[in-house]
Amino acid sequence: MWSNARATIFKALGHPTRLYICERLQEAPQCVCELTELVGADISTISKHLTILRNAGLVRSEKSGTTVYYSLACNCLTQFLQGAEALLKRKVEAEYSVLT
Amino acid sequence: MWSNARATIFKALGHPTRLYICERLQEAPQCVCELTELVGADISTISKHLTILRNAGLVRSEKSGTTVYYSLACNCLTQFLQGAEALLKRKVEAEYSVLT
DNA sequence: TGTCAATTTGGTTATATTACCAAATAGGAA
DNA sequence: TTCCTATTTGGTAATATAACCAAATTGACA
């Protein structure tokens, strides 16, 4: 239709595990094994999520020795995630104002 | 897990039709019938998409006569959508630089 | 080159999403 | 109230996602 490439970005972030991974990567690059432990899912599951994030252009990977480190593709992602936070806050406020 | 509420926001925008609808609403409020014509899908399909957007707190609806008008719940959504644009641009640039 | 740990891929099953159609509901206007 | 249009809801089928396990692959290092 239209807007497919942009929708892919939102879709990639529209899963709790993938969003959590991105939030962690804001702090520092992480290898797959660390992320796997943090999330507590099977390694293959994590790897697939990372592939989705990479294909969406949100993260990038880099090898160092035997491990692969993932990091945010762009610092602007931080700002973007804060935007979601603002929208969420707005939503909660709207719901609260209905009560009063 | 974590991040569920925020993931819901991204998920809502992670569908081409819903993203397109939000883009249209940036210009002006629209009724369901107009959006239906713009998208070219069944009215019930559009209505369900709008419900998802409303539940995510991204749009709100208001009756006027026999029609229901939808509009953005927050102007900050415009800025948020631009953030996706920036990420997409970044991705394309990264892909281009690999070629050279 | 062979080994070993890290990572990815494939298979399978369960669940979620999406679209259309048909029917129900709601609400303004006659 | 009754009609008529706009909107929502429910049913159903096709497709997409997601999780786990098992197996394959990759690449650094001995």
Image (tube, coloured by chain):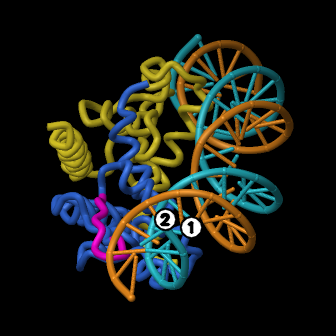
Chain colours: A blue, B yellow, C cyan, D orange
SS category of the residue bearing label 1: helix
Quadrant where the C terminus of chain B lies? Answer: top left
Q: Mark 1: few, some, or many residues within 10 Å (few <14, many ≥20)?
A: few
Amino acid carrying mark 1 in the image: Ser
Q: Residue at x 50, y 27 (%)?
A: B66
Q: Write the residue at 39% across / 71% down.
A: A21
* The quadrant where residue B3 appears: bottom left
Q: Chain of mark 2?
A: A
* Residue topped by disc 1: A44
Residue A40 image offset from top left, x and y in percent:
54, 82
Q: Report if residue B78 is visible in the image.
A: no
Residue A38 screen position, x and y as percent? 45, 83
Q: Answer with the quarter of the image where residue A81 lies.
A: bottom left
Q: Is residue C28 above or below residue B48?
A: above
- In terms of depth relative to the viewer, which is nearer, A17 or B19? A17
Answer whether labels 1 and 2 touch (C-beta < 8 Å): yes
Front-most of residues D12 and A12: A12
Task: Specify the segment rendered in magenta.
Answer: A59-68
Q: Residue at x 23, y 60 (%)?
A: A77
Residue A15 lies in magenta, yes or no?
A: no
Q: CA distance from mark 1 to mark 2?
A: 5 Å
Tell how many labels.
2
Residue on which disc 2 sits:
A47
